[in-house]
Image (cartoon, grey):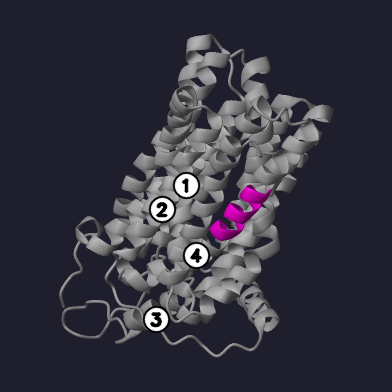
Amino acid sequence: MNQPAPLREQRDYRLLWSARTISITGSEVSKIVVPLTAITLLAASPFQMGLLTAAAAVPALLFGLHSGAIADRLRRYRPLMIGCELVSCAAALTVPLAWVLGVLTVPLLITVALVIGTAAVLFRAVNFPYVAALVPPDQRTAAMAGFNASYSVASVAGPGLAGVLVQVLTAPLAILVEGISFLVSAILLRTIRTPEDRQPAPSRGLWRDMTEGLRVTISRPVLRALLGAGVTINFFAMAYVAVAMLYMLHTLGIPVGLIGPLTALSGIGGILGAWGTTRLVKRHGENKVLVGSVLFFPIEILVVGLLDGPLWWKVAVLGVTGASTGAIVVAFASCMSGVIMRDTAEELHGRVNATMTFAVQGVMALGALAGGALAEVLGLRPVILLCAAGIATAVLWIWASPLRPPSPPRAVPWPRSRPGKGRSGAASVPLGSSAEADRTITKRQPLV
């Protein structure tokens, strides 16, 4: 049987990866440029800034489950993906055009954010099953690691690029880059050659399709464990993120100028994590790498919560933990996606992924609110230690599921036998006893 070519040699995967990397980088630029436009040019109020920030997250809550049901109904994924990018391109380009015409307003920025956010939700719902159709099964986790590396690259390059563009073009014109990135992404997607002609399962109505994805996710032990672990990790991780910057500035005394570089190290760690995840999965499989990443999550935050000493030591530890956390996040996310693809029927890929995304992303706002509220009562360091303890409980979901690594076989004691009556006097062992013991051990091992 012929082995598939490495992903880097597969033309269509390279095109898809390049399209996502360019598009995501453009979006990272806009995360800085759009708020700057609202503040510097439109004198946006705090309430308007809150609406603008929320506009990016609202589509996931409103349309997250619907997008999965829509994705599973499609015969071809790519036309919708191209359409989403073109709609996002048109929406982004309205900002510099409105500024040139003198009609740019905060409500227009909010509307643009809602349109682009909705297109992004639908794109992600379709992209997940499209990767499963484009990439051979044994390369899907590596493919998802590549996409997670794209996010890491964008998180490092996007903010720096945004700063340069604002200086050269001014904030509204810098949004041109986001619009162009969507257009380039659509062109690259258009050049993919792999044919599509899937046969979707018959739809029973949008609502019943949505509830089917939810039912499958909750009822199957592996998917339920991934859902529980993902929600637990994201809740406490966002509670940590909500207070991390205050903790670094006020408790640890980290200079403001070092916050940006320390944050960028997380993205660099994510790139290294994507490279390492691919190799670890080949050697140990998704299950073991997933368990390992969950076990290491709380250790990084615990170290930060206990950190003390001179400034150079604090900066060094924060740099190492930041890079480590970036790598761990990519490992967990990549293996989680790979397991979902592996253990879910093709006709349910879109709905199960949308259900996971809806729950895991939706809980982030609650975690951030909880972290800020608890910090007012308990203080910054206790909240970080509490987050480390909370994330540690995520391993219970994995350990109580079929994802738990199998226990090593127990040693079977050699049965004592009465000496035989033969001339050699050797002890006799009943035939078949060893084989029966092996079968008993196999039955006791957890399924993987």
Which of discs 2 and 4 lies nearer the camera? The answer is 2
Q: Which residue is mark 3?
A: 439
Question: What x and y, as percent, mark residue 382?
Answer: 73, 29
Instruction: Please tell me which of labels 3 and 2 falls first in the chain.
Output: 2
Which of discs 3 and 2 lies nearer the camera? The answer is 2
Amino acid at circle 2: Leu
Instruction: Please tell me which of labels 3 and 1 falls first in the chain.
Output: 1
Check whether the beta carbons of the residues at disc 3 and disc 2 lie within 8 A of each other: no
Check whether the beta carbons of the residues at disc 1 and disc 2 lie within 8 A of each other: yes
Badge 4 crowding class, 10 Å Cα cut-off, few under 14, some 14 to 19, many 20 or more, is many
Q: CA distance from mark 1 to mark 2?
A: 6 Å
Q: CA distance from mark 3 to mark 1?
A: 62 Å
Q: Magenta residues? A: 111-120
Badge 2 crowding class, 10 Å Cα cut-off, few under 14, some 14 to 19, many 20 or more, is many
Left or right placement of residue 437 versus residue 207 in this view: left
Q: Residue furthest top?
A: 310
Q: Which residue is mark 4?
A: 403
Assign a secondary structure to mark 4: loop
Assign a secondary structure to mark 1: helix
